[in-house]
Image (spheres, grey):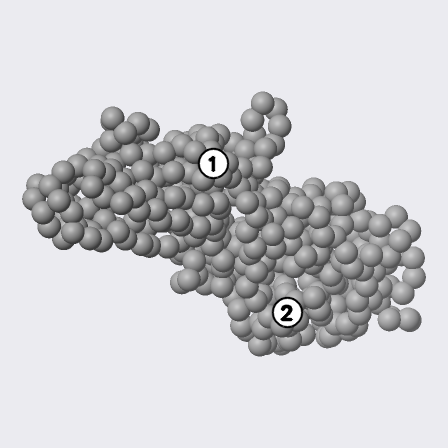
Amino acid sequence: MRKRFLKGAVCAALAVSMALGTVMVGASDKMELKEHIASIDTANSGINCRITSVGVEQGKIPLAKSARSGRVTARSVQYDTAYLVYNAYTIDKVNMDLQDTTHYTNWILGRTTADANTMVVNITLQKSGYLYVPFIGQDENGLDQNTELTLYQGNTKVGWTYGSSGVLKSQKVLGRGTYQLVLKAPYGKIGYAAVYPYYVTSENIGMSTSSKLIVGNGNNIVQTFKISGRRQVWIDSDKAGYGYIQRYTSGKWKTVSYQNYFYNSNGKLERAYYALSTGTYRFVMKPANGNFVEFRYGSKLYSGSYATKKSKAKTLGRKKSAKYNVLTATDAKGKSHYYKIKVTKRRSTRINITTAQNSGNIRVTVYGKGLKTKNLYFNGSKSGYVKGTLRKGTYYIRVTKMTQNTSGRYSVQYKY
């Protein structure tokens, strides 16, 4: 026979094979499990589940037979560590395990009654987070039967649901520790149940170039990462809320960027650009309580040389490719990179400038003998140019970091 889970409830646990890629923002597929979880979360009710109904094959082995076959002992207290769901691999594993309703290989099975001798599972969370418990309830003949599930933290109820199948969700973010799940059959009846506990955490699981998933708890949440060399760094997220970068230095965390706001309810990731040098960093975010947050980071090394004095200015070739470099968060306020162009005869000249940053301001100054100084200011991902007729001579381009928390990539080009 075929058991059909509650619409939306099983979306929280199944059909998540479309996993997270490293496709950059603007062309990114969303994390499937996050949408499915959100579909049963009233705080995220605006997000639609991509799969509207899911059939779960019961197979030829009813729960009763599995429980009686010796896999579990009826009426015993069982113990389980909830499975942490945080990336594509773990999503795929949950997907496969929950579809295994022929042998229930990684489910917890037990016998349910209406009294104190019923099925009990002590579930341990190794990190804080929201707990989810997909379940199936049957009678002794393998037919659907309602089951009551109650989750306790000590003597306090922190989750409850009732039905022949579905997902129990904790009422709040749970701290690290062990929680007791009690499953009961209707009064006067005996039944069997299968459960599969997993959770999404609110703790530090580290940044990665592939998407990860956490859940907001109303407080700041940090995710650490390391950088080697001078790099342009970008962070992608959908519902991180206000976020900024800190660097670990002299035994303390120091803020090295301005705040950026990450929120998009349309299934897209927002991107912020920074430039960082070798060190240990963390992304500090403050998502709303209960919001599921997808996040990742990427970087590109810029190892090209640059000059910090006018006398050492790097020459830009006419009609050559642009020169790219970065002003990092650890560079001092006012630090400048110098370039120069050589005009061999009087001609129309154009210098192109681009920036990719979300933190602070960069000033580009073009000057030289007989030329009125030109200043351009950039405070985001922008492009600009200086154009005019120049006489024969040498002209300089100075790229300056205007504030301490300014960081980003820039390019300069002697177009013609």
Residue 399 showing in the rendered view: yes
Amino acid type, label 2? Ser
> Can you tell which mark lies on residue 211?
none
Residue density around tag 2, few if under 14, some if 14–19, many if 20 or more, within 10 Å: many
| Res. 105 visible in picture | no
- For label 1, the SS is loop
Q: Residue 312 appears at what percent x and percent y?
A: 25, 27
Residues 68 and 334: in front is 334
Q: Work out whether 360 lies above or below 198.
A: above
User: Which residue is identified by label 2?
Assistant: 39
Residue at 77% across, 43% down: 177
Q: Quadrant of residue 203?
A: top right
Q: Is residue 309 above or below residue 282?
A: above
Q: Position of residue 273 (x, y in %)?
A: 44, 48
Q: What's the residue at 31%, 47% (across, down)?
A: 374
Task: Count neighbours of disc 1 (C-alpha within 10 A) and say few if under 14, some if 14 to 19, many if 20 or more.
Answer: many
Residue depicted at x 62% and y 72%: 46
Q: Amino acid at mark 1?
A: Ala
Image location (x, y in percent) of residue 263:
57, 60
Q: Compared to 103, does 374 lie above or below?
A: above
Residue located beneath label 1 in the image: 329
